[in-house]
Amino acid sequence: KYKMILDLDTGIDDALALAYAIADQDCDLIGIIGSYGNVLIEQGTQNSRDLLSLLGASNVPVYEGLSHSSTTSNFTVQPVSARIHGDNGVANLNLTHASTKIEKQSGVDFLIDAAHKYKKNLLLVPTGPLTNLAAAIKKDPAITKLIGHVTLMGGALTVPGNVSPVSEANIHQDPEAANAVFQSDIELTMVGLDVTTRTLLTKQETRIWRNLKTKSGSIYADLVDYYIEAYKETNPHLNGCALHDPLAVAAALEPKLLDTIYLNMKVDTNEPYEGRTIGDETRLNLPAITTQVATNVDVKRFTTKFMERLTTLFQK
Ligand code: BDR
Ligand code: CA
């Protein structure tokens, strides 16, 4: 059985990713690492704990990751993140605070230990900045060869970015970390805006959850309705909100959902293209290319599965 670790900056689509992972029967979710991005680290970690408890999964341990990139001294939430996810990352709802404690071990050390323990059975899904993974690789470079696969939400190869014309939010938070991860020989799949913006959820689907008349169903419906409204302001051409983070979890569990190309990537760490993910021309012809970039997604299969799983989970 695969073991999965999620590294989340828990805003609304991270909350959906978490629910998708919990609903999976074939994989053990062995821990959550908290990150910064949509919210400050403390808030994101709290959100993960509260959501785990809401979903009856308080047994999943939560570890705190790093609170900002290694090239900055602190982190402040961008107004656009607060607008899309709410000031507290969860649509400004007052989730019941979980009693589950945060683990004493750091998120980075937990990841390193898990890599040694589970090796190729370990799947890592980062849906926020890559700060924690880059720090773990720096501390223990051996983990790149141990970890089974990293399926990350971030970047954009064939489409424009969402925080600048060329860069996507998660990569843009910590371009150096993202570049270090892409330059390592870890096996990874980049699930970027190329594919995530094709998977949309609408109020038609959230109504199904609301009609379940369960606590989790109505809270998740409220979360996503907020996200859909905010999405409309920034993406008036889209009818619904993008399922960025849950698509990465789904693809980690079922890689065939995606079409990918093998292409080693790099990240620009300086302006004018800071945060841009682009093919690394110096590593085009290596005998073994370890990075895959998603170029297409089976939208129907994914969204059907997504709704089946989450609806069943919220029924409880
Ligand atoms: C990514 O940025 C965050 O706002 C979302 O949670 C997602 O991980 C999309 O660019
Ligand atoms: Ca995220």
Image: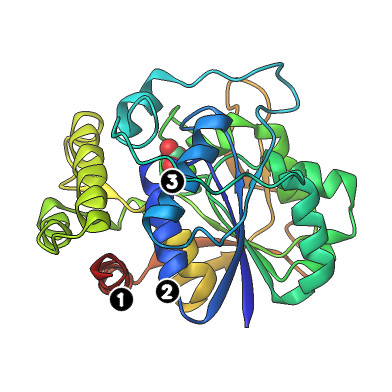
Residue at 70% of width from left, 76% of height from top? 121
Say left or right for 278 vs 73. left
Q: Earlier in the sequence, mark 2 or mark 1?
A: 2
Identify the secondary structure beneath mark 1: helix
Mark sitting on residue 100: none
Are discs 2 and 3 less than 8 Å apart at CB? no
From the viewer's side, name the closer residue of 264 and 189: 189
Are discs 2 and 1 less than 8 Å apart at CB? yes
Q: Can you see residue 264?
A: yes
Which quadrant is home to the C terminus? Answer: bottom left
Position in image of residue 162 (x %, y %) = 40, 34
Report the amino acid beneath label 3: Asp
Q: Which residue is mark 2?
A: 257
> Is the distance from the Cβ of mark 2 to the nearest ligand 1 atom less than 8 Å?
no
Residue at 71% of width from left, 50% of height from top? 182
Position in image of residue 129 (x %, y %) = 59, 39
Q: Can you see residue 161?
A: no
From the viewer's side, name the closer residue of 173 and 22: 22
Q: Is residue 77 above or below residue 303?
A: above
Q: Which residue is mark 1?
A: 301
Q: Which residue is mark 3?
A: 50
Give the alpha-carbon distance from disc 1 to disc 3, as whole Å.
Answer: 29 Å
Q: Earlier in the sequence, mark 1 or mark 3?
A: 3
From the viewer's side, name the closer residue of 27 and 181: 27
Quarter of the view holding residue 283: bottom right
Position in image of residue 113 (x %, y %) = 82, 60
